[in-house]
Structure formats: structure tokens, C-alpha cells
Amino acid sequence: MLTPLSRLRDARGGNPRAAAVAVFAGDLQDVAAPLDPKEQVVSACLKLALPAERPGATIRVPGEHLDKLIDLASRPAE
């Protein structure tokens, strides 16, 4: 079974040079929620994802933001 983080990685891997990547709002919420909201990229991603009416809604996220979010979520917990 794919996790929200793996789905974000797959979306970015399918569009490595894209300026914006289409992802599910719920996946973005699930990955960003446990991270530090003081991180600018986490805050920006949550602002994009939270207004979505349904978690299955597809939203476009800047590729740079998605790269940084994936990096933060992939780090071991401290």
C-alpha cells in the first residue's frame, strides 16, 4: 500500500522538472501536518492544501516546495 509520502515522491518523480506538480490535497496535508509549521515550506504547503473541500481534490504545488517538503518528511525523527 502506498503512503502519502510515497505518492508525493511518485508525483514529483513523474515530473522532475515541472514548475508545479499535481498532488492530492489530503496527501499533502498528511505529510505536512506532523512537521514543524514554523518551517516556511510546511506553512506554505498547508495553506495550499487546507482550503481544499475534499482530501481527494487535486491541487498544484510548486515543485521547489514539494522537493523541500519531501526532504523534511524523509528525515528521521529527532
Image (tube, rainbow, N blue to C red):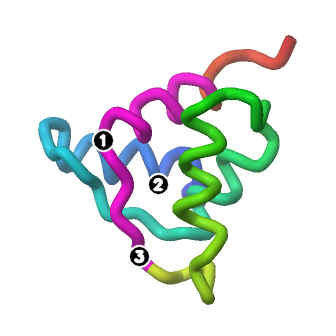
Q: Name the residue under label 3.
A: 58
Determine whether, in the image, residue 45 is placed left or right of residue 62: right
Secondary structure beneath dot 2 equals: helix
Q: What stretch is highlighted in magenta?
A: 58-72
Reply above or below: 27 against 66: below
**For the point 42% across and 40% down, which residue is it?**
66
**Number of the label disc, if any, that sits on residue 63:** 1
Most common secondary structure along the magenta stretch: helix
Farthest-out residue, top: 78
Give the amino acid type for the residue marked by disc 3 in the picture. Thr
**Which mark is nearer the camera, 3 or 2?**
3
Label 3 with label 1: CB-CB less than 8 Å:
no
Q: Where is residue 31 in the image (x, y as percent from the top left)?
A: 66, 48
Is residue 70 shown in magenta?
A: yes
Give the amino acid type for the residue marked by disc 2 in the picture. Arg
**For the point 74% across and 16% down, which residue is it?**
76
Query: How far, Cα to Cα, is label 2 from label 1?
Result: 14 Å
* Residue 18 in which image quadrant: top left
**Number of the label disc, if any, that sits on residue 7:** 2
Q: Nearer the viewer, residue 18 or 43?
A: 43
Q: Where is residue 19 in the image (x, y as percent from the top left)?
A: 18, 45
Secondary structure beneath dot 3 equals: strand
* Residue 72 in which image quadrant: top right
- Classify 10 Å Cα crowding around label 2: few (below 14), some (14-19), many (20 and above): some
Secondary structure beneath dot 1 equals: helix
**Number of the label disc, if any, that sits on residue 24:** none
The disc, 2 or 1, on the residue closer to the chain's N-terminal end is 2
Reply above or below: 18 against 39: below
